[in-house]
Structures are given as C-alpha cells and as structure tokens.
Amino acid sequence: MCRGGYHGGSRTEPRLKHAPTPCLFGATASGKSAVALLCARATQGEVVACDAFSVYRGLPLLSAAPVAPPEVPHHLVGILDAGERFSAAAFVAAADRLVADIHGRDRTPWIVGGTALYLRSWLKGLGAPVARDERLRESLKREALEQGPEALHARLLALDPARAAQVHAHDERRLIRALEIIAATGAPASAARGQWEAPDRVPARLVGLSRSPDDLARRIARRTDLLFEAGVLEEARVFLAQDPSPEARKALGLGVLAEVLAGPRSEASAREEITRQTRRFVRRQLTFFRSFDNVTWLDLTPDEPTELTSERVLAVLAP
C-alpha cells in the first residue's frame, strides 16, 4: 500500500532509500506529476523536475509546473528568470548534485518529467562539452536563410551521414548544432551520441506511464482549455515582456500565444493550434522515450485513480 499518501495517515515507508534512483516519466498530460507526488510522499522523497520549461519563473501554467507541498520538496522548478539559459548539461550537473544531497538527507530522490533529452543525458552522460560558436552559427543561419535549411542538411550528409539520417532536412536548429560539433571536434556529431548505447552512468529504475492515443488526445484538449481558463494569455504577456532567452521561447505554445497578443491570431484559433502542437510534440516525446532501455511501462486506463497508479509504480520499484 502507498502508506502516508492518499490514505491520509502520517506514517511513511522509506523503502526506496539507497536503492537505484526512481525515474518516472511519460507524455505531456499523462498525469505523471500527480502520481510522483504520492509516490514521493510515500517514500520520504523529494522530486527533481526533469523539465526544460518548468525551470523558469513565470511559466507555471504553460509548463504545468507542479505545486510542491512542504513535506515533498520539488527541485528545479521556478528557479530561473526568463532571460536565463538552461540546457541538458545544466540539468545533468544540477541533478547529480541534488540526488547526492537528497540521499545525504536519508531521503529518496525522484527524477520526474517529460524532457527525454535531459533524462537520457543524465543516465548516459554528455561527454566533453562543445562550446557554442556564435560566429559559425550566424554564418549557418544566413546560409539557411539564403539557400534553405536543405543546404545545411546536404552538408551534414556529406560530413556525417549517420547524424543526417536522424535530423529532418528542415530542422535548422539541430542541423546547425551538428555542424557546430563537427567544426569544433573534427569528428562526426553522431560519435558524441554513441555513448547513449553504453551502460547507464548512474543506478536508476525507469517507470513510464502510457495512455492510449484517444485518452491522451482528450487529456491534451482538456489541458488546453484549462490553460486559457486559468489565464495563460496574461502569463505569456508578462513572460514575453521579460525578453526570454532562446531556450525559454521554445516553451510549447508560447509562440502561438505571442501571435494572439500581437493581434493576428484569435483565441479560438490559438486553442486549436496549441492542441495540435501538443499532440505532435507528444508523438515525438514518446518516440524518444520508447528508445530507452530497461523501462517498465504501465498502461493506464482513462478512469484509473491517481492513487492506484502510484501504488502500481511503488510495486514495480519495491526491492
């Protein structure tokens, strides 16, 4: 049973201490944050948010940032201003420190979130960091503007066919990063990803929450409606006024809301577009998560109580 959780008792059952770190993930709108809260409460745990956007102050609605009760601390939530940058490397460094600190307090760290790249990077490592080359980036951006991103893809294909096969010909951001890595290291960008096939650098247990496509579609549509009812347009207006960093501007739906605020898009159109974007994002998100090794996937029914899901997660992780 999930003692100390939804039954309302004060007793806790710290049965995961010093075990491999539990990692709970799933698609956007899968309900992982609510499940994680009950699981962490039941195991004297603390949550380390594995999310690229809840790390920013001022985006609690758009990022679906969890609300942390005092007895279940949540880390890496609302810690950065809009103009600050965050990355997979920053997450890995922070997560390493937090997991050690939480274990040092004789509590259970829970890595929870939907940013697959961050989780994969924490599990496998990032290798030697490659610094940004702003001059090269500007040159490549001009080339993409003048000749189209297909020109960058053709160049990458000649230099690193393996990586080119993984990046869409119109994905300018990833094309530029791959060419930047090649220029800095003299080696294929795909070589840096080879370590992702290696054993995990940290002991962890992975649990994924899975819902049917129809169930996820309903939950995504409801999530979008709740965003607007809660005032996401005002949240976006205030956040955009702070000159967000390039990383922060990638928050799902923020660009659509900017169009509403500027005038050319209606709120009704924005709701539809954010729902479509979220569905597309979820498909990519799940494809990435499905590539992970040693995951226990739990299939959830539309009416499954959060309390039952948390018990199922704990049963998987119990030694």
Image (cartoon, rainbow, N blue to C red):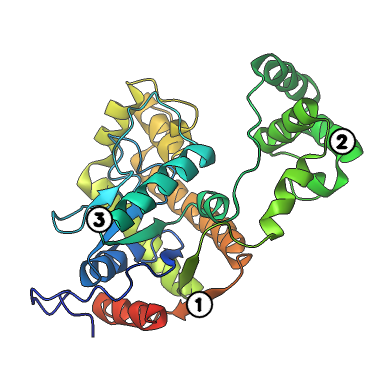
* Mark closest to the chain's N terminus, 2 or 3: 3
Q: Is residue 27 above or below residue 308?
A: above
What's the mark number on residue 154? 2
Marks 2 & 3, CB-CB < 8 Å contact: no
Residue matched to label 1: 296
Label 2 amino acid? Ala
Alpha carbon separation for disc pair 1 and 2? 39 Å
Within 10 Å of disc 3 (Cα), the crowding (few <14, some 14-19, many 20+) is few
* Mark closest to the chain's N terminus, 3 or 1: 3
Nearer the observer, 39 or 228: 39
Nearer the observer, 104 or 229: 104
Which is closer to the viewer, label 2 or label 3?
A: 3
Secondary structure, mark 3, is loop
Alpha carbon separation for disc pair 2 and 3? 52 Å
Residue at 25%, 70% in the rendered image: 43
Measured as percent of width and height from the top left, residue 151 is found at: 83, 30
Alpha carbon separation for disc pair 3 and 1? 28 Å
